[in-house]
Amino acid sequence: VRKRNDLDQNKIFLFGRSLGGAVALNLASQLSQTNATPPLYAVIVENTFTSIPDMAKRLFQVS
């Protein structure tokens, strides 16, 4: 995406849904620590679990 000339490099979004939300947030965190240029315009997550332990409890019905 960063190498495409037909895209506005100042408006790069990350989007993740469900478990992909965790991946998007992790990548956004890594990019912010490396001072990616240009920075991400936005990160959007949808139906993302709040944590891996919360997800495990729900999926595997453990307490």
Image: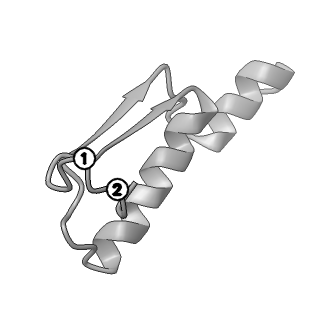
Percent position of residue 8, x then y: 17, 48
For badge 2, the amino acid type reads Arg
Please determine whether, in this image, residue 49 is positioned above or below residue 42: above
- List the residue tagged with mark 2: 4
Percent position of residue 36, x then y: 28, 73
Q: At 42% across and 69% down in the image, what residue appears?
A: 30
Label 1 residue SS: loop
Label 2 residue SS: loop
For badge 1, the amino acid type reads Leu
Q: Which mark is residue 7?
A: 1
Percent position of residue 10, x then y: 14, 54
Q: At 49% across and 19% down in the image, what residue appears?
A: 47
Please determine whether, in this image, residue 14 is positioned above or below residue 60: below
Cα separation, mark 1 vs mark 2, equals 6 Å
Give the camera-side residue of 4 and 26.
4
Give the camera-side residue of 57 and 11.
11
Tag 1–tag 2 contact (CB < 8 Å): yes
Find the residue positioned furthest to the bottom.
Answer: 34
Q: At 62% across and 34% down in the image, what residue appears?
A: 19
- Side of 50 relative to 18 (left or right): left
Percent position of residue 32, x then y: 29, 69
CA neighbours of label 2 inside 10 A, class few (<14), some (14 to 19), many (20+): few
